C-alpha cells in the first residue's frame, strides 16, 4: 500500500493520484498512507449519509494546486491584493457556470461551507433591510462615517431582528436561528414544525407564526425532511408579512440543478436569496454558494468577504467551476432523477420489511426511518449498521422522545450510492441489508439493569454476512473504477 506504480496502461486518473501520492509520501508518508486508507474504507462501505457524495476525479484534482496559495479578498476586478488575474478568471467562470446551471441572475461562489453561505446571506439581508436604509436617513454612505451614537443604535438594531425557520426535530438546521449557532445568538428566532399526524410541513401554521411574529426573514430548507417544499407558497407567506424568503437548499441543490425540483419547488425563482453547499447532492467540492434573482441584493452579497468570510479559496472555486460544468449535462439530470427514484425504492423496501417511514415516504434524496419500529434508538441502529458495513447517521424525528443525542431515527440518503451507479433493484437489496441488521439487533442492558439507549446485541454472523452483501454490491458498483487499486 505504500508504493506507487506509474504505468502506461493505467488511466490518467490513476496516474494523477498515484504521482500525487508519491510526491506527498516523500514528505509525510503517513498522510499518503491515510489518503490511500480513506479510499479503501470508502470502497468497502455503503455510504448512505444523505449529505455526502463522491466528487469526480476532475473536481478533486482541481483543488490540489497553487491556487491554494493566493490571497484574493474582494471580488473579481476589485481585490485587496495584486496578482489576482487568474483567480479573477476562476471566480468569474465559477459564478457564470452557477448562474447558467441554476438560471439565476447572480451567483457568489466564495463561501467556504454551508454555514458561511448562510452567514453571507443573513448579513446581506441585514445590510439591505436594516443598514442601508439607516445610512440613508443619516445621509452617509459608509458605516465608518456614522457618529458613535448612531453606530450604537445600528448595532442594536441588527440584534433586534427576527427570523423563523424549521424546527430541528422536523428536519431544520442549526444555522437557521438555533441558539448553539451564531444565527440563534444574532436573531430572535421562532420555529415552525410539521403536522403531528402527517409529519409534513403545515403551511397554515407557518403563515400563522409569520403573521404573529412578523419576522424579517423566513428561512425554508432542511437537512432531514424527506419531502419537497413548495417555495411559491413560502414566498406568498413571506410577501404577505413583508418578510424576505431565504432558502437553504444545501441538501437538495443537486435536485434543483438536475431539474427534478422545478416550478413551485425550485427555490431560485421563488426566494429572495438562496444558499447551498456544493458537496452534497450537487457532487462538487466542499464549499458553499449564494444565489439570487434580486439584483438589488447583489452588492450586499458581494461584501461577504471580508464581512464574514476569510480570503476566498481559489482552488475550491476552481473545483466548483468544474462541478457546475458537470451538473449542466443531461447525464447529471439523469443522475438527479435516479437519486430520487432510488430514495423511493429504498423507502418502499424498508417499509415492506416493517420499518416505519417518517411522513410515510419520500419525495427527495432522503429517507427518515423511525427505528422504534425495530425496538431500537437511532444510536443503536447507527452503530449496528456501521458494524455491518452500512454508514448512516442517527437523526431526531418529529417530536422525538429520545432527544437529539440518542434519537429515534436514522437518516438515509441516496446521492452517493447513485453516483456509483446503483439502481432501484440495488436499493431493494440495500433495504434488505438494513432491515436484516436492524431486525437482528436488540437493546442491551445498562449496568443498573435498565434498557440501554446506546448498547446493543448483534451476532457476529449477522454483521459479517451483511458486510459480505455490501461488498458484493460494491464489487458490482465500484467507487472510482477509473482509479486503479494499486495506486
Ligand atoms: N452536516 C450536514 C448534514 O449532514 O446534513 C448539515 O450540516
Image (cartoon, rainbow, N blue to C red):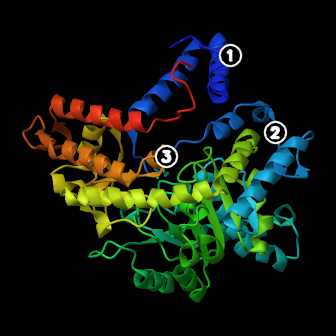
Q: Give residue 52's mark.
A: 3
Q: SS for tag 2?
A: loop
Q: Give coordinates of residue 208: x percent, y percent.
A: 44, 85
Spatial CA distance of label 3 from label 2 is 29 Å
Which one is in front, 109 or 79? 109
Q: SS for tag 3?
A: loop
Q: Which residue is under mark 2?
A: 71
Which residue is found at the position 40% from the left and 75% from the top? 201
Q: Badge 2: how crowded within 10 Å, few (<14), some, or many (20+)?
A: some
Q: Give coordinates of residue 154: x percent, y percent.
A: 72, 69
Q: Earlier in the sequence, mark 2 or mark 1?
A: 1
Left or right? Give the position of 381 relative to 225.
left
Spatial CA distance of label 2 from label 1 is 25 Å
Which residue is found at the position 24% from the left and 38% from the top? 384
Spatial CA distance of label 1 from label 3 is 28 Å
**Residue extending furthest toward the front:** 9
The residue carrying mark 2 has its beta carbon less than 8 Å from ligand 1? no
Q: Earlier in the sequence, mark 3 or mark 2?
A: 3
The residue carrying mark 3 has its beta carbon less than 8 Å from ligand 1? yes
Q: Which residue is under mark 1?
A: 23
Q: Badge 3: how crowded within 10 Å, few (<14), some, or many (20+)?
A: many
Left or right? Give the position of 139 relative to 121.
right
Can residue 179 be seen in the rendering of this structure?
Answer: no
Left or right? Give the position of 344 relative to 160.
left
Foreground label between 3 and 2: 3
Q: Give coordinates of residue 433: x percent, y percent.
A: 26, 43
Amino acid at each position: 500500500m505504500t508504493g506507487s506504480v506509474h504505468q502506461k496502461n493505467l488511466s490518467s486518473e490513476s496516474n494523477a493520484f498515484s504521482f500525487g501520492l508519491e510526491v506527498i509520501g516523500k514528505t509525510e508518508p503517513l498522510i499518503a498512507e491515510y489518503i490511500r486508507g480513506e479510499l479503501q474504507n470508502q470502497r468497502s462501505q455503503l455510504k448512505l449519509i444523505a449529505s455526502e457524495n463522491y466528487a469526480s476525479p476532475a473536481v478533486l484534482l482541481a483543488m490540489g494546486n497553487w491556487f491554494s496559495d493566493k490571497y484574493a479578498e474582494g471580488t473579481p476586478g476589485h481585490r485587496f491584493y495584486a496578482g489576482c488575474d487568474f483567480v479573477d478568471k476562476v471566480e468569474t467562470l465559477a459564478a457564470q457556470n452557477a448562474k447558467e446551471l441554476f438560471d439565476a441572475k447572480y451567483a457568489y461562489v466564495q463561501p467556504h461551507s454551508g454555514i458561511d453561505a448562510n452567514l453571507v446571506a443573513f448579513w446581506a439581508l441585514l445590510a439591505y433591510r436594516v443598514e442601508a436604509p439607516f445610512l440613508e436617513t443619516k445621509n452617509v454612505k459608509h458605516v465608518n462615517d456614522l457618529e458613535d451614537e448612531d453606530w450604537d443604535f445600528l448595532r442594536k438594531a441588527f440584534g433586534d431582528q427576527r427570523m423563523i425557520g424549521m424546527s430541528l426535530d422536523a428536519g431544520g438546521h442549526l444555522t437557521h436561528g438555533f441558539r448553539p449557532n451564531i444565527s440563534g445568538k444574532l436573531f430572535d428566532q421562532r420555529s415552525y414544525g410539521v403536522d403531528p399526524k402527517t409529519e409534513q410541513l403545515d403551511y397554515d401554521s407557518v403563515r400563522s407564526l409569520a403573521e404573529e411574529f412578523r419576522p424579517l426573514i423566513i428561512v425554508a430548507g432542511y437537512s432531514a425532511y424527506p419531502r419537497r417544499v413548495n417555495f411559491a407558497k413560502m414566498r406568498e407567506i413571506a410577501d404577505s408579512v413583508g418578510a424576505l424568503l431565504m432558502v437553504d437548499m444545501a441538501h437538495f441543490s443537486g435536485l434543483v440543478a438536475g431539474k427534478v425540483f422545478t416550478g413551485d419547488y425550485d427555490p431560485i425563482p421563488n426566494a429572495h436569496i438562496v444558499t447551498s453547499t456544493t458537496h452534497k447532492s450537487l457532487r462538487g467540492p466542499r464549499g458553499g454558494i449564494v444565489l439570487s434573482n434580486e439584483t438589488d441584493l447583489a452588492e450586499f452579497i458581494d461584501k461577504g468577504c471580508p464581512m464574514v468570510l476569510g480570503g476566498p479559496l481559489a482552488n475550491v472555486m476552481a473545483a466548483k467551476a468544474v462541478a457546475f460544468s458537470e451538473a449542466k449535462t443531461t447525464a447529471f439530470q439523469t443522475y438527479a432523477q435516479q437519486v430520487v427514484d432510488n430514495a423511493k425504492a429504498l423507502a418502499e423496501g424498508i417499509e415492506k420489511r416493517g420499518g416505519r417511514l417518517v411522513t410515510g415516504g419520500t419525495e427527495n434524496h432522503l429517507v427518515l426511518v423511525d427505528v422504534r419500529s425495530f425496538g431500537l434508538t437511532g444510536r443503536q441502529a447507527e452503530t449496528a449498521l456501521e458494524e455491518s458495513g452500512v454508514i448512516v447517521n442517527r437523526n431526531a424525528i418529529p417530536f422525538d422522545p429520545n432527544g437529539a443525542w440518542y434519537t429515534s431515527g436514522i437518516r438515509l440518503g441516496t446521492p452517493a450510492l447513485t453516483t456509483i451507479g446503483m439502481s432501484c433493484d440495488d436499493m431493494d437489496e440495500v433495504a434488505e441489508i438494513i432491515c436484516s441488521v436492524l431486525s437482528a439487533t436488540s437493546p442491551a442492558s445498562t449496568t443498573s439493569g435498565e434498557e440501554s439507549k446506546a448498547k446493543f446485541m448483534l451476532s457476529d454472523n449477522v454483521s459479517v454476512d451483511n458486510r459480505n452483501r455490501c461488498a458484493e454490491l460494491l464489487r458490482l458498483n465500484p467507487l472510482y473504477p477509473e482509479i486503479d487499486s494499486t495506486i
